[in-house]
Image (cartoon, rainbow, N blue to C red):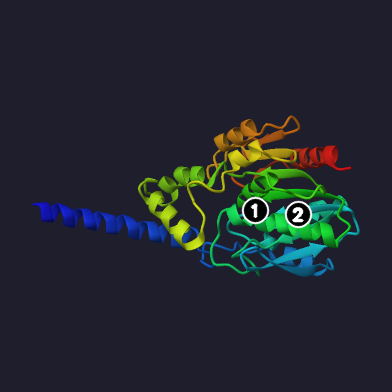
Amino acid sequence: MKKIIIAAAGLIAAFVSGVAFVLYMKFLKTGKSIFGTKTPEDLLEWLDKTGHKDTYMISDDGLCLHGIIIDNNSDKWAVLVHGYDSNATGMLGYAQKFLSEGYSIFLPDNRGFGLSEGVETTMGHFEKNDLVKWVRKLSDETHAKNIVLFGVSMGAATVMLASAENLPESVRAVVEDCGYSSVRDEYEYNMPHTAHLPPYPFLWIVDIITRLKSGWSILKDADCTKAVRHSNVPICFIHGESDTFVPYYMHKRLYDSCQRADKEMLTVKGAEHTEACGKDPENYWKTVFGFIDKHFI
């Protein structure tokens, strides 16, 4: 009987570990079919006509990262950070709006996406370090006097995490659109819906995998709630009230955690994940530029 129990326990452990590894490969390893949402051709054609240029940088852990610069001969810069299943060109719709308002644009490819090296996303953890390094490079090499960090979804998480880091003084504001409160919160919420599994014990094993393979913790790192509590710059929080991928309660949690008196929030009724801009563009952009204008000099 004892041997049967031991054998059964071993089979269960092997099953849990196997499923956890599949989850890691599916959701954190990039280059898969679920990653890289295709950018509409008209936006790519528009980009070709802008006179943009490619730029590269080596990350602190040795990856060659790629970004796109659209210099509008302005000292106002918008750094637009894409989400989980996208790349730099996925932010071109936002870039058009910022350009029309007189901004210069920087669009980074997050590690593992677009033309940047890397085989794994860390959901904002190492990406925040990449972003800080990009912004320092931008400040050193251009006439950027005022910089806003603007991110959507995982890009929103990245800019929130970066807000608590040692940013150049030229970074005046952060705008986050539908970012999650933490990677742990996001996976705990979504696993029953996307993988049809309870979060635990599987996330414990995924956490061991990310710690051993990549040096970060899916359960402890990329905690945006903690980051915004110590933010060094004003933050505007935007979320769709009908978001079922990054639920609305995370928006409230983030806003309430931020200790800054100059924070703002916008809730867009009826908007699902990443749909706030399209659902109510007039109010969306009025809020975004009104917020930024308060903090640019």
Decide which of 208, 23 is in the foreground and name it: 208
Give coordinates of residue 275: x percent, y percent.
64, 46
Q: Is residue 92 visible?
A: no
Q: Residue at x 53, y 42 (%)?
A: 244
State left or right for residue 146 relative to residue 42: right
Q: Is residue 65 left or right of residue 209?
A: right
Q: Amino acid at mark 1?
A: Lys
Rounded to the nearest angstrom, the CA distance separating label 2 from label 1 is: 13 Å
Question: Dividing the picture into quarters, in which one does residue 13 lie?
Answer: bottom left
Residue 273 x %, y %: 59, 46
Asked if residue 267 lies left or right of residue 249, the reply is right
User: SS of the residue at dot 1?
Assistant: helix
Q: Residues within 10 Å of mark 1 (few under 14, many from 20)?
A: many
Picture coordinates of residue 238, whole percent (x, y): 67, 39
- In the image: residue 61, left or right of residue 170: left
**Residues at marks 2 and 1 touching, judged by CB atoms closer than 8 Å:** no
At a point 74% along the width and 63% down the height, the residue shown is 43
Q: Give the number of callouts.
A: 2
Please say if 133 is above or below 233: below
Query: Can you say which quadrant of the picture contains the C terminus?
Result: top right
Residue linked to disc 1: 128
Q: Is residue 69 visible?
A: yes
Residue 51, located in which quarter of the rendered image?
A: bottom right
Mark nearer the viewer, 2 or 1:
1
Judging depth in this view, the residue of 210 and 92 nearest the camera is 210
Give the secondary structure at mark 2. strand
Q: Residue at x 81, y 47 (%)?
A: 169
From what the image shows, is residue 234 above or below residue 106?
Answer: above
Kind of residue at badge 2: Val
Say which residue label 2 marks.
79
